[in-house]
Image (tube, rainbow, N blue to C red):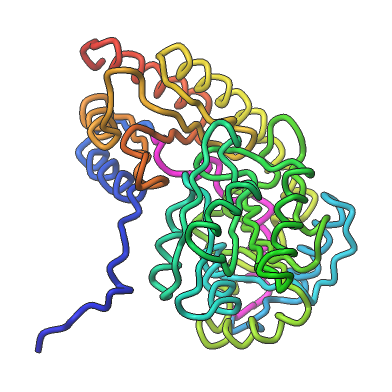
Amino acid sequence: MTLTLSSRGQTAPFRAMDVLAEAARLEAEGADIVHMEVGEPALGAPKAAIDALSADLAAGATLGYTSGLGIERLRRAIAALYGRRHGLDLDPRRVVVTAGSSGAFSLAFIALFEAGGRIGLADPGYPAYRNLLGALGLRAVRIETGPTTRFQPTPALIDGIEAGQGALDGLLVASPANPTGSMLDRAALAALIDDCRAARGGAGRALIVDEIYHGLTWSQDAVSALELDDEVIVVNSFSKYWGMTGWRIGWMIVPERLVRPVQNLAQNMFICAPHAAQIAAIGALSPAGEAEAEAELANYRQNRATILTTLTGLGFRDIAPADGAFYAYASLPEGHDDSVAFCRHLLAAHHVAATPGLDFDPVRGAQTVRFSYAQSPARIAEGCARLQRMLAGATPA
């Protein structure tokens, strides 16, 4: 029997993970790799998260199925977070706990859009948005952004897309964004929300906002879309600010009328988010857990200054704003025009792992690269020193 793959199964690779795999192979051979390819905090889960899970296990917790919407204690704790950060009185019933932000996006895309639906995405942008939409039979519509719009979509850009290609059924934006770190301020976010309300002759356009890097901002606090509109869907996760990447625990906030449809989908697709991770997340949201996460911000600030100074000095161009998150995204210096080859040589010869821009922008990404600065200051400084040696043509140390 010969199996035939569906067209939806022909998903593009996630190059950052391919780079990570090659870096792991070199590490297994004894190489000292500086990891600047993936957005994975070096610190790991807060001790408070580990302690919360340990206490439940010691008390005899069996970690069985939970509600498809998540443990009630966790949903209340997430709602309380919006009170502390944004002054919102959020109904915990609107909180859906998911298997990472990836689980949230899957649920949102299926709940909101019919097959063939057209969803606008900023390029450069997180590749899994585009790839997941395609796997679900939806169409990712590229919105080309750049320095003039601070790498974020605008109503004018969206209007231009719709004038030439037809109406969008939805829009997905991220603030802070991956790979650029660019943030939408209150006015810019409000303009996009107003544009979505008025779209399609007043019928409206669904808006999903990725807020996974909230808490990791460097000049001003991030604005949540929920401060401006209750009809948006907001996605977040414990992976970045709390450093809990492998725990696969996230959440989404949905309008009340979507709670039951999303719950039904979650029950059938995932049954529930991992029970152990939910317990740990409750600990992460404790005062001790948040204090641990906050303590790491000073390292990120130092790393950000180190890498932006290095890239500027080495002639990288169109460096993205890096308002938040822990990424630096830029065009290669003059004389370099192949980001895949650049990153391959940087890893093979100098043992620094970085991600070629084609992951984030399949049209212009051959000239761009993303560096993550989520490691310790000493490791980021070492990675920058190796990058300087590579561009100076020096022999690897």
Image quadrant containing the C terminus:
top left
**Residue at left offset 70%, top offset 70%:** 201
Residue 39 lies within the magenta run: yes
Image quadrant containing the N terminus:
bottom left
In the rendered image, residue 344, in percent from the top left (x then y), is placed at 24, 34
**Residue at left offset 68%, top offset 47%:** 214
Where on the picture, by quarter, is residue 316? top left
**Residue at left offset 22%, top offset 77%:** 5
Where on the picture, by quarter, is residue 91? bottom right
In the rendered image, residue 221, in percent from the top left (x then y), is placed at 77, 39
**Residue at left offset 41%, top offset 15%:** 315
Residue 255 lies within the magenta run: no
Relative to 286, 261 lies left or right? left
Look at the image and tell me whether residue 241 can be seen. Answer: no
Look at the image and tell me whether residue 362 can be seen. Answer: yes
Q: Which residues are magenta?
A: 35-63
In the rendered image, residue 356, in percent from the top left (x then y), is placed at 34, 38
